[in-house]
Image (cartoon, helix red, strand yellow):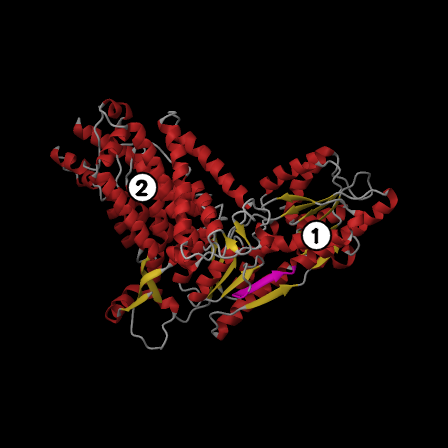
Amino acid sequence: MRVVHLGAVAMASALFVGVSGSSAQAQTICFAFQDLETEFWVAGHKAITTTLEEKGVRVIERNGNEDANRQLEQVRDCIAQGVDGVIIIPQDGESAVTIVKESQENDVPIAVFNRPPSDLSRGLVVVADNETIAQQAVEFMAQKAIARFEVTGEKATPLIMVGDLGDPNAVGRRDGFFNVMEKYPQYFNDPIEVSTEWDAATALANLEAAVTANPDVDFLFTSSDFLFPTIRSVLEPRGKWLPAGQEGHVIMGGLDGDATACQLIKDGFVTATGVQDLFFEAEAAMDAILTAIDAGETQPNQVIEDPGFALTAANLDVREMDMWGCVLLAEGFLDQ
Amino acid sequence: MSTIESGSAPAQVGSKGWASPVRRVLLSEYFVLYLTIVYFLILLPFLPTLSNPQNLSNVLSNMWPLLAVAVGQTLVLTIAGIDLSQGSVIGLTSVVGAALIATAASSDVLSNSVLWGLVITEQGGLFAGKSWAVPAGIVAMLLVGALIGLINGIAVALLRMPPFMVTLVGLIAFGAFAIFLTQSENIRNLPDAYIALGKGDIVSVYLGEQSTPQIPRRQIYSFITYPMIISITLAVFAHFLLSRTMFGRHVYAVGANRRAAEISGVPAKRIIIQVFVFSAVCATIGGILFSARLEAGRPTLGEGTFLLDVIGATVIGGTSLFGGKGKIVWTFFGVLFFVLLSNTLNLMNLSSFHIDMVKGSVILAAALLDVTRRRLLAGGLA
């Protein structure tokens, strides 16, 4: 690449650019998110924007509307506006790599919230340990299935609703599920995988087909809690949407920890859900980016892990308010 | 027989002595360029970042892939057709190219793909490591794109099916096929030479004195880039085709009145097929630029509101939805205006929903303007 120095036009350019130059102002953060389709993202968006504004930080919001190219262009526009830092919820792990590189090459620190880049070596990456969290939730579900096996002598027929495998979160959740399945092969038939691509309509169509082909499914793990209403719409007409204790109950679990899952655990329909600590993740992303800005670091790289936990029917009493969805539920989120 | 309007409207208007300056501007083939300049100047005091060199660099960067695709759409609209399948061509060809040239792949992500083990493995695509990988991959992409265009063209020209229906089916079917090939996964690890096609600089500009040993990247602005060269070359070629060749005359003739053109000896069927092939090839080139800038083959590239951008930019430029009228230079202005519009809406910090609503309104206004211009022309020539 050839760089041409245009010193002679510098003054004219400076005049032309004029007021766009930075001055002693409050910090400006560009918050570029891919969409706000699920409770998790809505709550995450609110936590980040509210907290940043409370700290006196100006927030420029950009909604990529599930278009990776648009999100890249939006982040470039933000950089041109002279933002001090960028927080993104990327469309997927691959586009995250490209956007992180773009931002860092322009000397703008960037933090990636919850959905990690495929390459974790660059950027401030705040991510839940999806594999461990999923494993904890599925382990609790498996114990319920084993208890049932000891009564009936019948293996459970497990089904997993897999997210978009271009998203490392989805890969981790799937791995956590299969770790448990491989641990107890004597209690489970071969798992059925249903692709959702993180899309409710795709999930609905594929789950309908899977349950029709395998009506004996009695163990279901969804890689995201936002699909519980979809699952209900498939299971209820088939008489399989039943609370624990009733004949034909499907042992169900998920991951995210949203308000719907919290309500369903209380009602006995869902056995466990893996919980990402949304508030911790939002706080960690903001602290990391603001610290980097204050320190003048333009290319900070760090992986901040959210250990998470599993909220189950057994620990609901003691850990309920550690789950962000239960907090929102208590605030009347589902009544809005 | 209908008049073939190939952009000579102002002369016709002038000959009829239309005095109204508004009419003259409205009917000028540079109307959108004037509009773009006025729009830029009006917003500049309110959005000073607009003239920031980095922002201008962004505007240009966003323009090139869209221009490549819009050039193909221009020809299709000029024959009174429409090509909705361009989005799926972009997605499918980006996947095909990436699967062939990727330097590595993850079995965790792609093992469910039908391409896994056949075309792509953990060691990369079929062409991985070969010196000719990138050109060969691009040739393969162009062939796939051209094949889709051929199918569209045959259906429209020989089977006389409506272009809207044929290409809508193409949009759905080829888009689904792209998703099927990778099971919706993206293919990463593209060679650097390929990525350079989407974001590589040939000449960059630094404005100011060099006071530090190393100039911060943020202060170096892309000026002449590979995507710029590729898109402008394509646009110049298409302009030459339309304005300087018999093929171009035939395109206008078919668009103005296919039956009359056929009676006059124009090989309308062949022209229609060639135009659809050209459109798909342009979409493929756009796909190369998009996938290279995003550094991945993505089956979902070209989905969403992308077609709104392509058709919108082309129509805003002045290419008529009724056929028989279109110019590449108009499309260039249309794309410039459309990209500037998107950029300014972003700088105004509007939400994506508002941005799409404004874009839709502008396209509607452009379509209305097209109708108005036709009426003015018809009235002036009557």
Q: Is residue B360 above or below residue A108?
A: above
Disc 1 crowd rating (10 Å Cα; few below 14, some 14-19, many 20+) is many
* Amino acid, disc 1: Phe
The residues colored magenta run A121-129
Residue B316: image tag: 2
Question: A84 or A113: nearer the eye?
Answer: A113
Instruction: Tell me where residue B212 appears, x and y as whole percent.
Output: 35, 77
Instruction: Tell me where residue A219 appears, x and y as whole percent.
Output: 75, 44
Left or right: residue B164 compared with residue B27: right
Question: B19 or B207: nearer the eye?
Answer: B207
- Local secondary structure at mark 1: helix
What residue is pinned by disc 1?
A177
* Amino acid, disc 2: Ile
Say whether residue A49 is visible. Answer: yes
- Local secondary structure at mark 2: helix
Residue at 28% over, 50% down: B233
Residue B166: image tag: none
Left or right: residue A266 compared with residue A102: right
Instruction: Tell me where residue B344 appears, x and y as whole percent.
Output: 36, 53
- Give the Cα separation between the discs numbered 1 and 2: 52 Å
Disc 2 crowd rating (10 Å Cα; few below 14, some 14-19, many 20+) is many
Residue A124 in magenta stretch: yes
Q: Chain of mark 1?
A: A
Q: Chain of mark 2?
A: B
Q: Quadrant for the C terminus of chain B, please.
A: top left
Left or right: residue B35 compared with residue A177: left
Q: Is residue A120 above or below residue A184?
A: below
Nearer the observer: mark 1 or 2; the answer is 1
Say whether residue B349 is visible. Answer: no
